Amino acid sequence: MVDRSKFNAEDFLVDSTFQQYCAGTDPLCIGYWEKYINAHPEQAAVIAEAKRLYVILSGNKRPLNKQRENLAETLFPVAETVKLKNYLWLKIAAAVVLVLGSVFLYRTYLNKSTQSVVPEIYSFTTKGGERKKIMLQDGTSVLLNAKSNLTISKDFNDKCREVTLTGEAFFDVAHDKAKPFKVHTTDFNINVLGTAFNVKAYADEITSEATLIRGLITMEATTGNGGIITLKPSQKVTFYKTIAQKQPAKLVKPTAPKPEITINHYTKIKDSTIVETAWTQNRIEIYDQDFDEIKNILEKWYNVEIRFKNPEIEKYRFTATITNETIAEVLQALQQTENNFKYEIKGKKITISK
């Protein structure tokens, strides 16, 4: 029995029964492949690609038997009274021409494709104020926070499990000793077997961090500086970006100092909520944070743009819990704890002043 579990699109294409299924020429082949597709949903994408290539190679024409008949009639017209069996050799010749032409077209298509091959990736993106849950092929669960992007290669879970993250996500990774799970960010890479952790790596923020909830992970800065860091449950590592990374490149000549790295425990408040992962429960926990840092959180959570008219306001510090409040209600609550600021809301733009 042929094992088709590892077939790629080309393997399906060279299977004669699959060709007859695509062409619709043999009821037995059609029945067999319909049952096979229903029984192997994991191969749906590969089979769809094989069918798409078949359509390309066949010129998006009618079923194969009709093509052979039309080609034979065009090349060698015969009277309708002549029995088809007398011209069987014409049909065979036509079929050979068609098959050879299809092979030539496919090889040409394949050669052109491989000249500019780029790894096919799947991308998941969230807008401001949006969160999205993603189930990966290996059973890993990913909760993507606002204004974030997760990319996954087409061959994910084949020989390795690697993803690239911009923004913030909570990973609950399925254990697979043979295939370590890797998360790539701009500032660091994470390796893990099976665990739960939070990664925050927004390009517009001056720090990036990873918080381990369960299991064990190792981290390494993408610059190669700092060596490998091993995190244990309840620990959080923070990467402080250089000043040159935050300021416009045209104003600063970038240097190559090693980013400062700190390892601490995550912040746990009285009801056992972990501040760093509270967003996964649809709430924001602000714990003794300055207004500038809170600004970044609120902008992503509510999909707004906040501007400070007075720099000293950025240093105001707050502790608060945000659940289902509107942005106006949040600002009003913060204002009650620190009366030295005013705010104005115009659509999605918010101005905060003294």
Image (cartoon, rainbow, N blue to C red):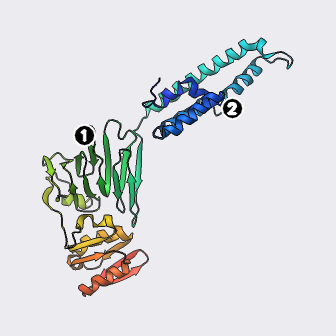
When the figure is inspected, residue 304 is found, relative to residue 167, above or below; the finding is below
Residue topped by disc 2: 62
SS assignment at label 1: loop
SS assignment at label 2: loop
Amino acid under disc 1? Lys
Please identify the quarter of the rendering in which residue 66 is found.
Answer: top right
Residue 120 rendering spot, x and y as whole percentages? 42, 41
Residue 49 rendering spot, x and y as whole percentages? 51, 36
Nearest the viewer among 141 and 122 is: 141
Please identify the quarter of the rendering in which residue 330 is found.
Answer: bottom left
Q: Residue 177 carries which label?
A: 1
Amino acid under disc 2? Arg
The reply to whether dot 1 and dot 2 touch (C-beta < 8 Å) is no
Q: Residue at x 57, y 25 (%)?
A: 17
Nearest the viewer among 68 and 36 is: 36
Q: Is residue 249 visible?
A: no
